[in-house]
């Protein structure tokens, strides 16, 4: 039956090509659409994971409720609040940074950690000023837990340790202040101090808010400028397996009064948005595949109707129902497989081209996922759809009675 | 020796039943060339299809080479049909995508015997004067050539019985005559039993036996000549 099936495929060139192109578009569309969406998601997740660290230990903010004051007044049973307590308790520094360091060093899950101190400040140069987040880091440790080095556009991040009052600023902040490398800006803090700081490097993360408002300096520079010697507000941690960061964070969160959050807990809203994107992507791509399947089904149905006489003669010369089914099934599946493979190539080429399109964000060009799973899924979905779409006309062909066909022909 | 035995063959359709074949009983000897005649609706074609197992029986029994054809199921029935029976219809029913040679070898392909049967197929093409059409598709051939190709296809497995339903019905008299000569030659040289339904009294009379049906019953059953054994 392979022989006849191939003859059918090659003799019906226009129908075969039509089906083939529908499948190519289906598989290619799946690859391109998934490549773009997942590429963007991978980029976002990469940013979330690698730029801000896997786990962040930070000062806790407590919101006061009636529950917060339980046990403070008389016997709890006798307390009735006329005005329910409300408010917030916040802490300027971690409860015990040294205790955290000890705990982190003992953990097998941790690869590296970096202490930070973050304070609000105002950067001024001449008549220009900008509210900034002054972040004090240990540059060597910071590079071990985040990939900020990839975003450096000028200078050496490690040079922050080469002296006091040296800073790295975002490219946009530098423009706002009308400054250039080696210029000095005045940094005012809530402690009332104004410290001249020298710009020794710049970075460009692609995130507008970060690039406009973040200033990196050494830990001691920030501690001195804000009168907070020895204080640490954040510890950024890198673990061996980022997918297990939430488990580690949840476990540590129970043990201490500070807040411990993993990258995915910290960005749960963005991740749930990505989940919604996944639903949209799946619905759209499945719609592609269903359209392809209907195309194959319609064309094969027409072929079966045109080939009634062939079916009758094949049955009269000893071919059985299964042969007839196979004849039509294999046509759909063969075109499906070849079309799916061509569709993958089309999708790959399409993604390669789209990746070169420049956009004013992120890596400055379209971000494409090259995950092999996209291609595997596209292939099996399209071939699966071809099998299902071919099966029904093929089964109908197998059930045709040769004598009925002959009677209706004569 | 009887190659076909029909016993009380009844075929009816629908409800209430419209009886087309009314308890027909007869037997066919190996090597006979039987012409079945009768008016339209007399049950000629139905008898042919019931005898060959392409159509079901309502009641009765048809035995071919001692086997009850309607008791055969699945692979056994298809193999039996492939090995023992050839069919020629009013229309050639050639597969339009295949060449003459490929069409003729289609029955052999079922059991991957196309190589084994190729030489025989070529000799049939030569005998039936379609060798020049070997690589042509049906659309490139005349009606007579197509019907001769269909006969070669029916004979390529060297079946014991050839069932022909109005094989000349779609041909002009010249081509009809050629087809009849081929049938006579096949019957004479290969000893193939031929069961031919026809409207043409002259063609039916050229067989060794003629059965005339009237309203689903045998009106006459006469041997026109002795068969060679």
Image: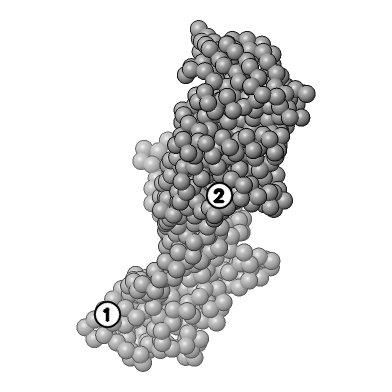
Q: Is residue A62 among the parts visible in the rendering?
A: no
Instruction: Name the residue that disc number 1 marks.
Output: A176
Q: Residues within 10 Å of mark 1 (few under 14, many from 20)?
A: some
Q: Quick one: B27 or A61, which is closer to the camera?
A: B27
Q: Quick one: A47 or B112, which is closer to the camera?
A: B112
**Is B6 on the left-hand or right-hand side of A282?**
right
- In this picture, is A62 found above or below A210? above
Q: Quick one: B145 or A375, which is closer to the camera?
A: B145
The numbered mark at residue B134 is none
Q: Residue at x 65, y 37 (%)?
A: B186
The numbered mark at residue B130 is 2
Picture coordinates of residue A146, whole percent (x, y): 52, 73
Looking at the rendered image, the quarter that the C terminus of chain B falls into is top right
What is the C-alpha distance between the residues marked 1 and 2?
91 Å
Looking at the rendered image, the quarter that the N terminus of chain B falls into is top right
Q: Secondary structure at mark 2?
A: loop
Q: Are marks 1 and 2 in contact (CB under 8 Å)?
A: no
Q: Residue furthest top?
A: B16
Picture coordinates of residue A22, whole percent (x, y): 42, 53
Of circles 1 and 2, which is in front?
A: 2
Please state the chain letter of the residue tagged with numbered disc 2 in the rendered image.
B
């Amino acid at each position: 039956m392979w022989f006849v099936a191939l003859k059918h495929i090659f003799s019906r060139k226009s129908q075969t090509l039509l089906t083939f192109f529908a499948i190519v578009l289906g598989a290619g569309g799946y690859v391109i659409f998934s490549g773009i969406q997942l590429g963007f998601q991978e980029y976002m997740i990469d940013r979330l994971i690698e730029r801000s660290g896997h786990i962040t230990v930070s000062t806790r903010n407590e919101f006061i409720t009636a529950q917060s004051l339980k046990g403070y007044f008389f016997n709890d049973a006798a307390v009735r609040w006329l005005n329910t307590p409300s408010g917030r308790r916040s802490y300027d520094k971690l409860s015990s940074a040294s205790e955290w360091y000890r705990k982190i060093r003992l953990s097998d899950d941790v690869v590296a950690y970096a202490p930070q101190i973050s304070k609000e400040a105002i950067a001024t140069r001449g008549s220009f000023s900008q509210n900034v987040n002054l972040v004090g880091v240990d540059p060597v440790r910071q590079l071990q837990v985040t990939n900020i080095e990839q975003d450096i556009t000028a200078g050496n991040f490690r040079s922050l340790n080469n002296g006091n009052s040296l800073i790295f600023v975002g490219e946009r902040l530098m423009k706002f202040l009308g400054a250039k490398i080696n210029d000095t800006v005045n940094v005012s803090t809530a402690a009332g101090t104004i410290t001249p700081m020298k710009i020794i490097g710049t970075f460009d993360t692609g995130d507008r808010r970060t690039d406009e408002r973040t200033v990196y300096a050494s830990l001691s520079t920030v501690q001195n400028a804000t009168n907070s010697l020895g204080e640490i507000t954040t510890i950024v941690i890198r673990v061996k397996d980022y997918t297990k960061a939430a488990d580690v964070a949840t476990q540590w969160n129970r043990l201490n009064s500070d807040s411990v959050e993993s990258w995915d807990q910290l960005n749960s809203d963005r991740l749930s948005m990505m989940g919604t994107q996944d639903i949209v992507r799946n619905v759209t791509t499945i719609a592609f595949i269903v359209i392809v399947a209907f195309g194959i089904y319609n064309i094969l149905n027409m072929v079966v109707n045109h080939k009634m006489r062939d079916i009758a003669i094949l049955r009269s010369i000893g071919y059985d129902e299964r042969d007839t089914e196979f004849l039509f099934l294999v046509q759909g599946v063969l075109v499906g497989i070849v079309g799916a493979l061509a569709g993958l190539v089309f999708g790959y080429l399409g993604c390669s081209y789209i990746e070169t399109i420049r956009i004013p964000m992120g890596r400055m060009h379209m971000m494409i996922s090259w995950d092999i799973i996209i291609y595997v899924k596209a292939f099996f979905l399209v071939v699966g759809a071809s099998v299902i779409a071919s099966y029904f006309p093929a089964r109908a062909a197998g059930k045709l009675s040769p004598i009925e066909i002959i009677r209706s022909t004569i | 020796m009887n190659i076909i035995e029909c016993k009380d063959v009844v075929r009816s359709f629908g409800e209430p039943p419209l009886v087309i074949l009314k308890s027909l009983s007869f037997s066919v000897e190996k090597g006979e060339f039987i012409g079945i005649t009768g008016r339209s609706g007399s049950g000629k074609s139905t008898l042919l299809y019931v005898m060959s197992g392409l159509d079901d029986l309502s009641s009765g029994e048809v035995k071919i080479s001692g086997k009850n054809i309607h008791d055969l199921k699945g692979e056994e029935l298809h193999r039996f049909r492939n090995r023992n029976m050839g069919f020629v219809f009013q229309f050639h029913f050639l597969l339009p995508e295949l060449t003459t040679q490929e069409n003729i070898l289609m029955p052999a392909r079922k059991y991957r015997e196309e190589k084994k049967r190729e030489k025989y197929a070529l000799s049939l093409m030569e005998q039936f004067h379609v060798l020049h059409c070997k690589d042509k598709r049906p659309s490139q051939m005349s009606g007579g050539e197509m019907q001769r190709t269909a006969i070669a296809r029916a004979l390529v497995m060297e079946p014991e019985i050839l069932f022909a339903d109005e094989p000349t019905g779609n041909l002009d008299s010249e081509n009809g005559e050629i087809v009849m000569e081929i049938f006579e030659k096949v019957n004479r040289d290969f000893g193939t039993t031929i069961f031919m339904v026809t409207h043409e009294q002259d063609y039916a009379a050229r067989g060794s036996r003629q059965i005339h049906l009237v309203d689903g019953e045998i009106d006459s059953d006469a041997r026109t000549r002795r068969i060679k054994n």
